[in-house]
Amino acid sequence: MPVSEATISGLIELKRSDDDGLVAQLTSQLRSLIAGGRIGKGRALPSSRGLAGDLGVSRNTVTYAFEQLAAEGYLQMSRGRRPVVTADGDRVQEGAGAVASRARSGKPRLSPWASTLRQADWPMSYQAPLRPLRPGQGDFREFPNEVWARCLRRSAIRAPKRELGAINRPRLREALAHYLATSRGVSATADQIMILPSAQAALTLIAATLVAPGNDVWVEDPGYPGAAAAFRASGARVTGMKLDEQGVQWMQGRAAPTLIFMTPSHQHPTGRLMSLARRTAFLAASRPGKTWIVEDDYDGEFHYDSRPVPALQGLDAHGRVFYVGTFSKAMTSDIRLGYLVAPPALAGTLEIAQRHMGLLAASHIQEALAEFIIEGHFLAHVRRMRRLYHARRDHLVEGLQRHLGDVLSVEVPSGGIQLVARLRRGTADRAAVERLVEAGVETRALSSLSLGRPRDHGLLLGFAAWRESEISAAVRTMASCF
């Protein structure tokens, strides 16, 4: 039976102790009411403010649920008006019945790697609106879009005259080789550089080329989850390396693995800088030609308190280090370009594998980026953002220490675009993240970045994408949640 607007809230029961967050519960229950025909097509739902008041939740919780249902086609949303149901319950039920019938015929059989994705993935959806203080984000609002548009336009005009066939454009390779040598101490020729859709694509390419089922791979713990996912997809046995104040530690008493993944210039997520002595020790312990090291320099452009430490790759005299980078942090995330500097002995093989795996970047974007770098726009933008992000880091640190100093212990990174704030008491960082998201502040639980049983509990907070007024408002919101 259809229900009246006044009774909708009475049909919704939210459990704060449930594993699913309030947003997920509310979205699911509203979806069921629409699919079951209880809220018919053309009906307006209560306002977000009214429904939030009836349910005793924040208005953001209701807003995010409405936005998700609109993305799924259940609702139509217009500014200043209440959401309207656009799905026909009878048809949804008919379709759901067919889906359920197919589901009963057997659960899809997944690979061992794919079976782990649901529990390993970040519970926050990147389809949701960007909210302070989401980590891993640069400020796209400060990007020189007009300059970039001119580079794109010139690239498009020159397209008919370009030589076809090169999947890694020579101009960009040459520009990158020069930039990396002068800014990061990377030692490489242009033909060692591959241009890829993302840094994650570089890890996928390395894993597919070098890692066989059963091979040992060491990664940082806590560390970047995408690295473990890429190597597990190739059947590797992935083991976590512990950290200390000098960075990641070699695992004593263990045979050297096939591959080691690390972020030595700015450890993800702690921001710690690997000492020169530790870097040298890792190189000395790795067997040339048998143990490979992947150095991910995901935000190496941003150092604030000292001169940047040269890349590990530049210290390698035996060609055993891969260097991975991305433009999504320094420029804007929607450019979606990464790169890989391969050891000389593997560059040809990796380029063939790149082509066969389809890990290709659009030629016109590569040509535009080459011009952006050659004309000095990239370096000018990085220098400007380095000053801006430095100030934002300090502003966030000061706000956290003033308003949440008794709750969080802030680790101030020497560079990067995010920081770690550890919980002084307790280990419920995932519950804290849920509370903050409901209040409109998006963070990541430090425990979610551990391979096994978490040793670290805290919050990973981004500061680069947010202006100081936005950071201040987010910190005040955080203080009200603890």
Image: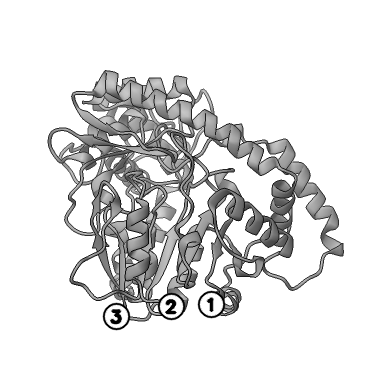
Marks 1 and 2 sit apart, C-alpha to C-alpha, by: 10 Å
- The tag earlier along the polypeptide, 1 or 2, is 2
Residue 48 image-quadrant placement: top left
Residue toward you, 243 or 39: 243
Q: Which mark is residue 346?
A: 1
Amino acid marked by disc 3 = Gly
Q: Which mark is residue 193?
A: none
Mark 3 surroundings within 10 Å by alpha-carbon count, few (fewer than 14), some (14 through 19), many (20 or more): few
Q: Nearer the viewer, mark 3 or mark 1?
A: 1
Residue toward you, 318 or 18: 318
Determine contact: label 1, label 2, CB under 8 Å. yes
Residue toward you, 321 or 185: 185
Kind of element beneath mark 1: helix
Marks 3 and 1 sit apart, C-alpha to C-alpha, by: 21 Å
Kind of element beneath mark 2: helix
Q: Which residue is mark 2?
A: 210
Q: Residue 388 appears at what percent x and percent y?
A: 53, 29
Mark 2 surroundings within 10 Å by alpha-carbon count, few (fewer than 14), some (14 through 19), many (20 or more): some
Q: Nearer the viewer, mark 1 or mark 2?
A: 1
Q: Residue at coordinates 38% horizontally, 66% vertically from top-left?
A: 283
Residue 284 image-quadrant placement: bottom left
Up/down of 405 relative to 414, above or below: above
Q: Which residue is mark 3?
A: 214
Marks 2 and 3 sit apart, C-alpha to C-alpha, by: 12 Å
Up/down of 348 relative to 368, above or below: below
